[in-house]
Image (cartoon, coloured by chain):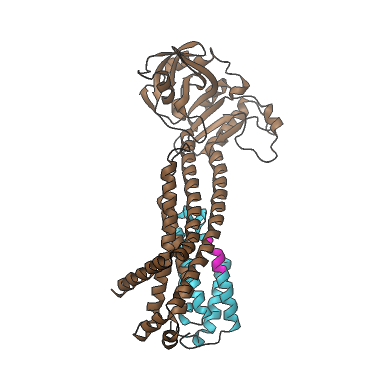
């Protein structure tokens, strides 16, 4: 592997593992019949959000700043979409905000390169 | 421009991988193909069934309430012995509903039976005869292709006239127009004054194509319309702007007063509406959809691992090429996107094959299941979305690994 090797803090490891499990468990859910009923393009939109989140967690796992930036961007996009379809989940927001705070604590120690 | 070049190059790499390692690629794509096929096939069948059911329910009328003895849906511990003793809907109650129900636009007394229809030497047994009062055309959605509906005098005086289904007309009168002909219904002569427009099979049964409609006042002379087995009902259509719930609450009060039910006594009638049927089927379709989605989801998961595997092998095989590309100035994102495109392209082909199989099956199936099975636009979008997303998710880690390779070490590798 190229680039700066930054030792990953235990908290980021735990967050990344929870994140991977969260995305993998929730990814099939975006293709559920109930989502398809909202709009033809809704599974595509939610699927793209989940896939981006998965990529963000890979970036966070490798201690890359782009992972954190991607996660925060996707968090806001996701919440806007969920608010529009009136499906916002308070627990998910709290968990995401907690993840973001933890990531930002270690943000400066992360690699700014791709 | 650089993006297009990258896109072209990635597609060429993917095609090369497909051609050089045919069996490996085929086996890897098979998971995605089976997954997409399973999910989209189930969704296609469920959507087609649902569409067909909605069409059938709509023909019964969304804004129609049915006054009957039996409810259409029962709970797990419904007291059937209580329902058994309920009185049947009565023709005299229709007059009261028409007079006193403010929310009703129209209402009709309807009952049905099985009879034998004859025309000269042709005879058809077990034909459904619908015996209805005059406003039947206002509470039931149907079209008359030839002829006309009953005149008021024909309904009230009980004249021997009938409107018959399209299929029935074609069988009874193969080489002539059935209008004005006299058929025999249970031995009595009836003049055909109209032919229903062909509607095809209904998922709920009872297609008008094979039915005979006669005025209920005429049917009294043929059949005992008070027979319990005929399950008579009063169909009440709500006025525009009146909801079914409002109509039901008005009808409940009216029927309770008509049948002299005391305030604390239970009702001895059922007020049914079509939403009861569609709600029952909605939950069934949801379960079938979820089952298909779980089965297909596992296939796709396995397919995703297959794609990830093929991509790791691809990165390993092309490590020295990656090294050369990077030493010549290729950026990390260029290598990353190159492998990502390849992964998405491979997955896309898997999904495309799956969708093509579904499309071919829908074409072959045609109308053989008594309904048209159509691969809808939403399912095509869903199929492509799933395959592209699986390509992205399963290809990102190998692509990222490739992009992070040290050029010197990469060139040295075999």
Q: Would residue B296 be visible to someone looking at this image?
A: yes
Q: Quadrant of the C terminus of chain A?
A: bottom left
Magenta part of the chain: A22-28
- Identify which residue is drawn at 49% across, 46% down: B45
Q: Residue at x 54, y 74 (%)?
A: A97
**Looking at the image, residue B17 lies above or below residue A2:** above
Where's residue A11, x and y in %?
A: 60, 81
- Frontmost residue, B75 versus B6: B6
**Is residue B224 part of the magenta span, yes or no?**
no
- The answer to whether any part of residue B375 appears in the image is no
Residue B231 is left or right of residue B192, and the answer is right
Query: Where residue B235 sits: x, y (%)?
Result: 52, 29
Horizontal side, residue B94 vs residue B79: left or right: left
Residue B55 coordinates in the image, percent (x, y): 46, 38
Q: Colour of chain A?
A: cyan
Residue shown at the point (59%, 72%) measured from the top left: A18
């Amino acid at each position: 592997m190229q680039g700066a090797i930054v030792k990953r803090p235990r908290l980021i490891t735990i967050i990344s593992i929870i994140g991977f499990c969260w995305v993998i468990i929730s990814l099939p859910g975006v293709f559920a019949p109930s989502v398809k009923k909202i709009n033809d393009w809704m599974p595509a939109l939610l699927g793209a959000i989940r896939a981006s989140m998965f990529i963000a967690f890979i970036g966070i796992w490798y201690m890359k700043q782009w992972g954190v930036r991607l996660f925060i961007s996707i968090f806001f996009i996701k919440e806007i979409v969920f608010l529009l379809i009136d499906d916002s989940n308070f627990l998910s927001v709290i968990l995401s905000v907690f993840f973001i705070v933890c990531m930002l604590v270690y943000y400066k120690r992360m690699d700014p390169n791709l | 421009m650089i993006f297009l070049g990258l896109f072209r190059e990635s597609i060429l790499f993917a095609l090369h991988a497909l051609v050089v390692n045919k069996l490996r690629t085929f086996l890897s794509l098979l998971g995605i193909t089976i997954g997409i096929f399973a999910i989209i096939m189930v969704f296609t069948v469920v959507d087609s069934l649902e569409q067909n059911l909605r069409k059938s329910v709509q023909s019964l009328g969304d804004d129609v309430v049915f006054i009957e003895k039996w409810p259409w849906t029962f709970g797990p511990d419904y007291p059937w012995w209580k329902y058994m003793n309920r009185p049947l809907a009565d023709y005299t109650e229709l007059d009261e509903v028409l007079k006193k129900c403010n929310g009703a636009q129209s209402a009709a007394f309807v009952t049905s039976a099985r009879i034998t229809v004859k025309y000269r030497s042709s005879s058809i047994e077990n034909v459904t005869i619908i015996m209805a009062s005059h406003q039947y055309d206002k509470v039931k959605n149907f079209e008359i292709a030839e002829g006309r509906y009953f005149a008021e005098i024909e309904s009230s005086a009980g004249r021997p006239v009938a409107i018959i289904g399209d299929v029935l007309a074609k069988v009874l009168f193969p080489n002539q127009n059935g209008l004005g002909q006299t058929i025999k219904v249970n031995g009595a002569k009836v003049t055909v004054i109209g032919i229903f427009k062909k509607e095809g099979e209904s998922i709920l049964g009872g297609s008008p194509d094979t039915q005979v409609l006669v005025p209920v006042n005429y049917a009294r002379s043929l059949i005992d319309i008070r027979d319990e087995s005929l399950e008579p009902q009063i169909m009440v259509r709500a006025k525009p702007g009146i909801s079914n719930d409002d109509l039901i609450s008005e009808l409940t009060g009216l029927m309770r007063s008509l049948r002299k039910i005391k305030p604390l006594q239970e009702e001895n009638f059922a007020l049914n509406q079509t939403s009861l049927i569609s709600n029952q089927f909605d939950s069934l379709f949801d379960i079938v959809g979820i089952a298909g989605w779980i089965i297909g989801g596992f296939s796709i998961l396995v397919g995703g691992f297959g794609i990830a595997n093929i991509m790791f092998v691809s990165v390993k095989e092309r490590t020295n090429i990656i090294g050369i590309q990077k030493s010549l100035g290729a950026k990390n994102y260029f290598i990353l996107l190159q492998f990502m495109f390849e992964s998405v392209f491979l997955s896309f082909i898997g999904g495309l094959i799956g969708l093509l199989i579904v499309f071919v099956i829908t074409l072959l199936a045609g109308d053989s299941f008594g309904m048209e099975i159509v691969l809808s636009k939403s399912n095509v979008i869903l199929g492509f979305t799933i395959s592209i997303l699986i390509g992205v998710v399963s290809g990102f880690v190998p692509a990222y690994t490739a992009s992070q390779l040290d050029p010197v070490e990469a060139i040295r590798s075999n």
